[in-house]
Image: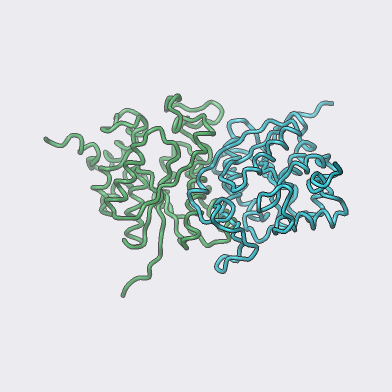
Chain colours: A cyan, B green
Amino acid sequence: MQRPRIPALVVLSGGQDSTTCLYWALDQFGADAVEALTFDYGQRHRIEIDCAVKVAARAGVPQTILPINTFAALGGNALTEAGIAVQSGVNSRTRLPNTFVPGRNLIFLTFAAAFAYPRAIHHLVTGVAQTDYSGYPDCRQTTLQALEQTLQLGMDYDLTLHAPLMFKSKADTVLMAHDLGAWAALADTHTCYHGQQPPCGKCSACVLRAKGFAEAGLADPLVERFHAPP
Amino acid sequence: MQRPRIPALVVLSGGQDSTTCLYWALDQFGADAVEALTFDYGQRHRIEIDCAVKVAARAGVPQTILPINTFAALGGNALTEAGIAVQSGVNSRTRLPNTFVPGRNLIFLTFAAAFAYPRAIHHLVTGVAQTDYSGYPDCRQTTLQALEQTLQLGMDYDLTLHAPLMFKSKADTVLMAHDLGAWAALADTHTCYHGQQPPCGKCSACVLRAKGFAEAGLADPLVERFHAPP
């Protein structure tokens, strides 16, 4: 029996987590029902968007890239401003890393909902995770639940937010990607805060990623790609 | 005794309602504690932003204009696309006017919160009203309450959303503007869906505005401006 087509939209950043979620969505909703939405919000490193394009192309899903010029205009954080160094330490007032962009995931998911609305898409998939969330309050389950309700009320529209990695460790996410057939795609992803390929291996994002693969007992396809025998 | 300075941010569109809210905020928080945030989101009529600039200047409050290029990229609604005629009728699927931009107020208030966060502003003021809301679900009190909770959780930040016009009729809003000393400022505001000054007087926005003034028993300073004796 053919299953009914239930369309879903994945917010795809080009990183490991959202790539894994894309394959989760393909598994859940079917290859013909998934599309990807990527935000061009003034990332310091354009390589993130290049990676998202590669990942979507490899998976064969339609992709839309939406611009957001507002974060750059707001200014003041290390993810969009070239003049601000990424610091693993924390801001003294907010106790958050200086990569924190207030409300970034709220904005991404609200625009994703606005994109989904006229297309009659009722399922949004995001790669946020509470486990390794570095203190980002917009990655918490409670935030996502409140946002889901806000979007339902604010658009008068039935919408479900899926965060399949919410309570997974990085190691579990690695194993999940492996099981879902996302392995080759992981070689196309981007994690490094310094925008380097091969990844610098030293920034907090690279270290966290390496830890996940180490704990899962598997080699990172991205690292392998740059160390493959000639 | 001097009252403590509690800073507040008003989302100022250049329309009648947000202008009235600006004067409400000046009354509540004091002249030295209020600033205005205006979004340049690809409005069909640049006159709205011009009006917001005039209103902020007349009130003597600092104003920031933040760009949002995403709505225009999303497309498909009459408020940002020149090719789509404003229809007072309703969309057959959504039962909403085609001026509905899904999530528009959610986005505005989330960016306002992101603007407020590094400035330690804990009070946001918006002119949305449930009474005359034309079916816009993001103008409802329930939506605003859910959004307030989402912003508090998502930014881990104490934030209050004020919507002083939420349950007021247009006539009450007119009387409120009069009492708050916003009368001269109303002559600088913009309402007409067709972007005309003098206002067309025929579109649903003009008709609704005229009805409010008529019910309040007062002449609209904007209309008066264009009919003043030479």
Instruction: Give whichever of B48, B132 is nearer the camera.
Output: B48
Q: Is residue A150 visible?
A: yes
- Residue B181 in percent (x, y) is at 25, 53
The image quarter containing residue B52 is: top left
Instruction: Give whichever of A164, B65 is nearer the camera.
Output: B65
How many numbered markers are drawn?
A: 0
Q: Where does the C terminus of chain B fall, quadrant-wise?
A: top left
Residue A149 in the figure: left or right of residue B36: right
> Where B26 sits versus B88, above or below?
below
Residue B69 in the figure: left or right of residue B218: right
Residue situated furthest left in the rendering: B230
Q: Where does the N terminus of chain B fall, quadrant-wise?
A: bottom left
Residue situated furthest bottom in the rendering: B1
> Where A90 sits versus B204, above or below?
below
- Residue A148 in percent (x, y) is at 62, 47
Q: Residue at x 54, y 55 (%)?
A: A83
The image quarter containing residue B186 is: top left
Q: Residue at x 34, y 32 (%)?
A: B195
Q: Is residue B87 visible?
A: no
> Where A203 sits versus B191, above or below?
below
Instruction: Give whichever of A202, B70 is nearer the camera.
Output: A202
Instruction: Give whichever of A203, B194 is nearer the camera.
Output: A203
- Residue B121 in percent (x, y) is at 45, 61
- Residue A227 in percent (x, y) is at 82, 47
